[in-house]
Image: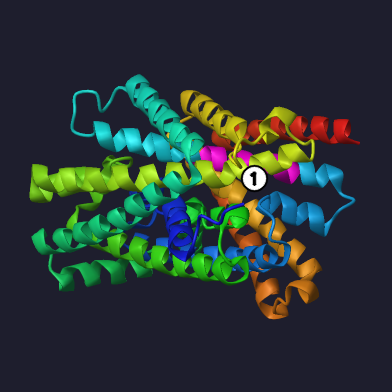
Amino acid sequence: MHKNLGFKELLAIAIGGMVGGGIFTILGISVAMVGALAPFAIAFGGGIAWLAAYSYVKLGVYYQDEGATYSFFKRTYPSSHMAASFIGWYTIFGYISTLALYAYTFSSYILSGTSMAEEELFRKLLAVIVIMIFASINLWSVKGMGKLEDFMVYGKLIILFLISMVLIAYTDTDWHTFTTTIEKDFEATPLLKILIVSSITFVAYEGFQLVINAVNEMENPTVNIPKAIYWAIVLVALIYFVIALSAVFAIPTEDLIANKESALATGAGEIMGEWGENLVIFGAILATSSAINGTLFGASRQMARIADDGYLPQILSHRQDGIPKYAIVGMAMIASLLIAIGGLRLILEFGSITFLLVSLLMSIANFSIRDKTESLLLITLFSIVGLSIGTILILYYEFQSNPEQLLFIGILYGVLSFGAWGYAKAFN
């Protein structure tokens, strides 16, 4: 197979998978919970992501398997067919939920400021259409997808930087007032609440794993897997911090809270006028587009790998010219269904819970074979503890704030578990 993807493309896939709906979606929700401390809580989520990435990198270099999360667990515990099926189903549906999140955010921004902004039905219809467009691009060409991802990712990074600088330049707020607000919020906000926000916003860092899904199409996996993933997390954490800091500095807190899905665009519009709002909207469109594109690319290959082993319908494993076409179509259709039945908050929190849980399982798997993967014991144990705390915190928050939504998420897991159990029984 021709190796179409070098470090530049892999870094773009990782950043594209992370900087998508993430910062645009989580900003308003985070500010509503911890006020001016949101930038610090979001950046701390990058620390949790690094803990998760450590085991992914070690397992990715050791196994070099496009099945990534699913394959790592299955190959580490080869006799655990039922567990492999469960983790495969949970992981794929986690990716599908983030795909839905990015598409939902795309439509929210492109419609912001129009008469149809509050039309939920039209917003969901547009989200489905954009998923289908990028599914078509992924069906077309790996090389074409990679080049388009390069353009969208590096383009959106430039625009996000411009947005931050312009917000700071146009605001009437002075730094003394702002730092005083931060100090007051630090004194008034319990550390537990900051950690809960970091856990909830973990889904904004999900996406670095997509690099591993491209192992069959990348140059020098041993070097490029760790290089692309670690650089991507550092850059994304910095991007999130700068964007969030400039937003809470320049845009009134009540505006960020009131306009959760399109908080940046609405706030920029009030400060800079129509051109500022359009700049943010264009940045959000690029960001969410690249995330949809990258997620479809990476997760479809993992879905095909799971189907290869009989834990998903066999038709999903079919590849044409190396492209898992039925897996791409299947992901697009299920994400569209999730958009139709779910809301933004549900999709966000289901994705965070899923990826925290799956990342925890990867850390445990890495601990089991740490001698083979040459992992440091202290970092591996720290990863397990940190991800365990993150998972517990988000479940605690859900139980306290929205038990009905937690129940719905539980039912969703029940449905996934039944499907995974059925395929695991059939496999045996």
Which residue occupies the extreme top position in the image?
Answer: 121
| Residue 316 quadrant | top right
Residue at x 70% of width, y 76% of height? 375
In the image, the segment drawn in magenta is: 86-98
- Image position, residue 123 (x, y; %): 34, 26
In-front residue for pair 399/419: 419
Q: Is residue 194 visible?
A: yes
Residue at x 28% of width, y 54% of height? 155
Residue 90 in the magenta stretch? The answer is: yes
Q: Is residue 399 visible?
A: no
Which residue occupies the extreme front position in the image?
Answer: 2
In-front residue for pair 173/357: 357
| Amino acid identity at mark 1 | Gln
Q: Quadrant of the C terminus?
A: top right
For residue 336, side relative to residue 238 (left or right): right
| Residue indicated by mark 1 | 302
Residue at x 80% of width, y 69% of height? 369
Question: What secondary structure characterizes most of the magenta part?
Answer: helix
Residue at x 24% of width, y 52% of height? 253
Mark 1 residue crowding within 10 angstroms, few (<14) / some (14–19) / many (20+): many
Residue 52 in the magenta stretch? The answer is: no
Q: Secondary structure at mark 1?
A: helix
- Whether 94 is drawn above or below 36: the answer is above
- Total numbered labels: 1
